Amino acid sequence: MTGAEAAGEAPARRGPPRTDLHTHTDFSDGHDTLEAVVRAGAEAGLDTLVVTDHVRADTTYLPAYAAAVRAARADAPLALVCGVEAKILDTEGRIDLPADLTGIEHVALADHRFPLPDGPAHPDTVRALLGEGRLAPDEALRLLVLATARAVERVPAGRTAHVAHLFSVVPKAGLDEAAVDGALLEPLVRACRARGVAVELNEKWRCPSVRTARLLHRAGVRLGAGSDAHRAGDVGRFPWVADALAQATTEERCTP
């Protein structure tokens, strides 16, 4: 599988996406086994399944996880990519990854916390900073985009990547994604285009918005689909994503 295939798919054709960039097994917080997730992906009609179990710097299960994915790949009826999901830590773009990524092919970059200069903050902390006037909304959004762009640039060599559930932390922190414009997105656009990194439209969190996705698409950033499935039955099932991708990638026509 090429890096482009692992990192996302351009929605040139209509119909359900055939790659699921974001799934979980019982190696982390998923409900079902890897075998069940792979089987569900095939039943959903996927061509490519990326498993992205959660990791932190101190995660120890990666050798067993990579070995299990490698073994499952031998009989899998679809392309199977061994990935992990890790949070962006700060505005320098540091990623909460184990030092040894042997066997890991793909990284999903996630905003599980709000990346600030001094580290990841709980959304409630950011909401309080905004309420106290210690952080301006436009500055908070700028820092989030900058952190995400720098994380894209920090993806370890030899791995593909995508940005998972972009802006899922925004409403939790009391911010409005409608304030995001093309100028604000520019650092992320540059990083994604330079590294061939896709931005995922996420079924679970229904983000980013169609408006943001359209801005990214028009700027040349590839979009992909992620179910964020924690149960096998949700793998490859993304009705909201399919509709959002179609809207984001269809140019509006002016009526005479």
Image (tube, rainbow, N blue to C red):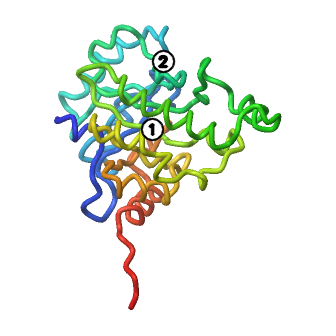
The residue type indicated by label 1 comes to: Ala
Q: Which residue is painted at 71% across and 34% down in the image?
A: 135
Q: Where on the picture, by quarter, is residue 100? A: top left
Q: Distance of mark 2 from mark 1, alpha carbons?
A: 14 Å
How far from the left and from the top, in percent, is residue 47? 24, 46
| Residue 19 disc label | none
Q: Secondary structure at mark 1?
A: loop
Which label's residue is closer to the chain start, 2 or 1? 2
Q: In the rendered view, tell whether residue 225 sits above or below residue 35.
A: below
Check disc 1: other Cα within 10 Å, few if <14, some if 14-19, many if 20+. many
Q: Where on the picture, by quarter, is residue 51? A: top left
Q: Which residue is painted at 53% across and 46% down in the image?
A: 204
Q: In the rendered view, tell whether residue 215 sits above or below residue 129.
A: below
Asked whether the residues under the numbered discs 2 and 1 touch, taking CB atoms below 8 Å apart as contact, a structural biologist would say no
Q: Secondary structure at mark 2?
A: loop
Q: Is residue 184 left or right of residue 119?
A: left
Label 1 sits on residue: 164
Check disc 2: other Cα within 10 Å, few if <14, some if 14-19, many if 20+. many
Of residues 43 and 108, the one drawn nearer to the viewer in this rendering:
108
Of residues 233 and 254, the one drawn nearer to the viewer in this rendering:
254
Q: Disc count in the image?
A: 2
Q: Is residue 59 left or right of residue 152?
A: right
Label 2 sits on residue: 96
Q: Which residue is painted at 28% across and 34% down in the image?
A: 195
Q: Is residue 155 left or right of residue 135?
A: left
Of residues 234 and 186, the one drawn nearer to the viewer in this rendering:
186
How far from the left and from the top, in percent, is residue 117? 59, 22
Q: Which residue is painted at 32% across and 54% down in the image?
A: 17
Q: Where on the picture, by quarter, is residue 140? A: top right
The residue type indicated by label 2 comes to: Asp
| Quadrant in which the C terminus appears | bottom left
How far from the left and from the top, in percent, is residue 198? 34, 42
